[in-house]
Image (cartoon, helix red, strand yellow):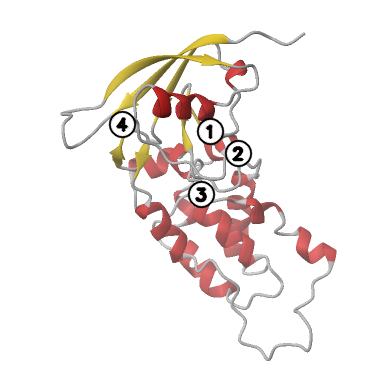
Amino acid sequence: MARPRRTIKLQIERYNPDVDPAPHDEVYEVESDPSDRVLDLLNRIKWFQDGTLTYRRSCGHGICGSDAMRINGQNRLACKTLVKNLGERVTVQPLIGLKVIKDLVVDQRPFFDHYDEIMPYLINDERPPATERLQTPEERARYDDTTKCILCAACTAACPPFWANGRFIGPAAIVNAHRFVFDSRDRATSERLAILNRRFGVWGCRVVFNCTDACPRGIKVTDAIEQCKRAILSESV
């Protein structure tokens, strides 16, 4: 027997810097199916109740990372968070630690600036082989977990050191550095470890584990950060 629809109260933090002196909450009542995700409710509100509501979304399948936000106080993807697991009243807020542009949309430029710092691409100036650059399964396994990052910023926006000082490179950048530091085909390991070893690099991590909890892809973020620390200390990867 199908579960009936129910009415959900969605409490959304709104802020339009052109007209609002400060953020404020607005509550919307919306019908919800048992299979609905938070993104479905946001879409319903925007399409049928309040077209001024502003948020990011794209693929709707947990791949693009566009719709990261705070849902009931935790950083989550709206497209992956089932309403049936949240109760009758749901709170939705923008990610913290990044400037709010409007409503649930934050300025991600500082986040992507840190991502760019670690040179997030394969660097190898050696003569290319006749086919592709091969790896063993064991070599691939060393960094397989950190290839899953979708750059949603959920981990970095859950990081107390990043809240305290935006110059801290943040967990997402370190995760993406890990992906290339431990790639046997890459030849810029020393350069990336030097970047991570700077004042606002990897040592800013306080091992709070918020990042690991926030990651919608299940990446062991804190473990990857600790591996990068050990690589710097040992100078051997």
Q: Residue at x 34, y 49 (%)?
A: 166
* SS category of the residue bearing label 4: loop
**Mark 3 Cα-neighbour bin, 10 Å: few <14, some 14–19, many ≥20:** many
Identify residue for label 3: 171
Cα distance, mark 1 to mark 3?
Answer: 16 Å
* Spatial separation of the CA atoms under disc 4 and disc 3: 33 Å
> Taking 177 as reference, is 87 above or below it?
above
Residue marked by disc 2: 216
Residue type for callout 2: Pro
Which corner quadrant of the image does residue 193 belong to? bottom right
| Residue 88 appears in the figure | no
**Which of the 4 quarters of the picture holds residue 127?**
bottom right
Picture coordinates of residue 140, whole percent (x, y): 77, 63
Q: CA distance from mark 1 to mark 4?
A: 22 Å
Q: Residue at x 65, y 44 (%)?
A: 220
Contact between labelled residues 1 and 2, with CB atoms less than 8 Å apart? yes
Kind of residue sitting beneath label 3? Pro
Q: Give the secondary structure at mark 2.
A: loop
The amino acid type, in three-letter code, at marker 4 is: Thr
Q: Nearer the viewer, residue 175 or 130?
A: 130
Question: Where, by quadrant of the figure, is residue 138 drawn?
Answer: bottom right
Which of the two marks, 2 or 3, is nearer to us in this view?
2
Label 2 – label 1 distance at C-alpha: 7 Å
Closer to the eye: label 1 or 3: 1
Helix, strand or loop status at disc 3:
helix
- Helix, strand or loop at disc 1? strand
Question: Looking at the picture, how far across and down is residue 114, in whole percent?
Answer: 42, 58
Are dots 2 and 3 in contact, CB under 8 Å?
Answer: no
Q: Which mark is residue 52?
A: 4
Residue 123 image offset from top left, x and y in percent:
59, 77
